[in-house]
Amino acid sequence: MAITFSIQNTEIIMTTPQINVEVQDLVNAIRLFEDDFRMMSFDHIIDAEGKATLPGVGVFTEIVMTLRNPWTIRFEDEATAHVNVTGGTTLAVDAINDPRPVTTNFGITIAQAASGILIESDKSGLTPIESAALLELWRLQGLDAANPMTVTPTSRSVGGITQVISGDGDTTSTVTRS
């Protein structure tokens, strides 16, 4: 994502064609620009909040980024007609905190996130016990290439899990974790 800033026009300019934009990427780029020494005499561009931790591993509230008056986002590629904003919501307000357009481009639709929560892609939102149980089930189905399953007529084992198979093998088999 390439972004430039026009202090004179109070614009955040997306200089490459964008279809999907992560709110966190926008916040990071804007905060980096705000930290530049040339911005010391200017008020900050956005208010951003969110990512409050919710119960569960890797579950957070969404990010809400609000462009402060008079800043807007402009897409340099006029062919852009629809942009998906993911991972949060982007708003813009005027001097009295009334809503105003986020972008100055005519005809651009910005689709906002609507879930209200974010789940980290490398996290599951499961408790540690639920996550461990899911991992065991995954291994017991032989899906873990790093831990091949060994099956004999009387047992199967994988990744430290051993199950004993008993019964007559024709009409009834019982599988018990040992």
Image (spheres, helix red, strand yellow):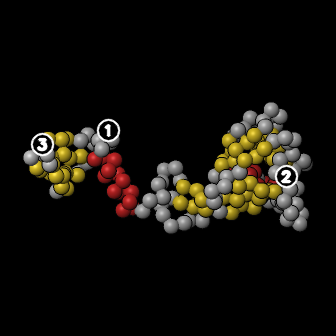
Q: Nearer the viewer, residue 152 or 67?
A: 152
Dot 2 surroundings within 10 Å: few (below 14), some, or many (20 or more)? few
Quarter of the figure with the N terminus: top right
**Which amino acid type corresponds to the residue marked 1 in the rendered image?**
Ala
Secondary structure under tag 1 reads loop
Q: Which residue is mark 2?
A: 101
Tell which tag, 1 or 3, sits nearer the viewer: 3
In percent of width and height, residue 169 lies at 12, 44
Secondary structure under tag 2 reads loop
Q: Earlier in the sequence, mark 1 or mark 3?
A: 1
Q: Residue, x 61% and y 62% (percent of image)? A: 61
Q: Which residue is mark 1?
A: 145
CA gap, disc 2 and disc 1: 50 Å
CA gap, disc 2 and disc 3: 70 Å
Tell which tag, 2 or 3, sits nearer the viewer: 3
Decide if residue 168 is in sight here: yes
**Which amino acid type corresponds to the residue marked 2 in the rendered image?**
Pro
Q: Earlier in the sequence, mark 2 or mark 3?
A: 2
Q: Earlier in the sequence, mark 2 or mark 1?
A: 2
Residue 89 left/right relative to 55: right
Secondary structure under tag 3 reads loop
Q: Residue, x 52% and y 50% (percent of image)? A: 121
In percent of width and height, residue 175 lies at 18, 52
Q: In the rendered view, tell whether residue 158 sits above or below residue 47.
A: above
Q: Which residue is mark 3?
A: 170
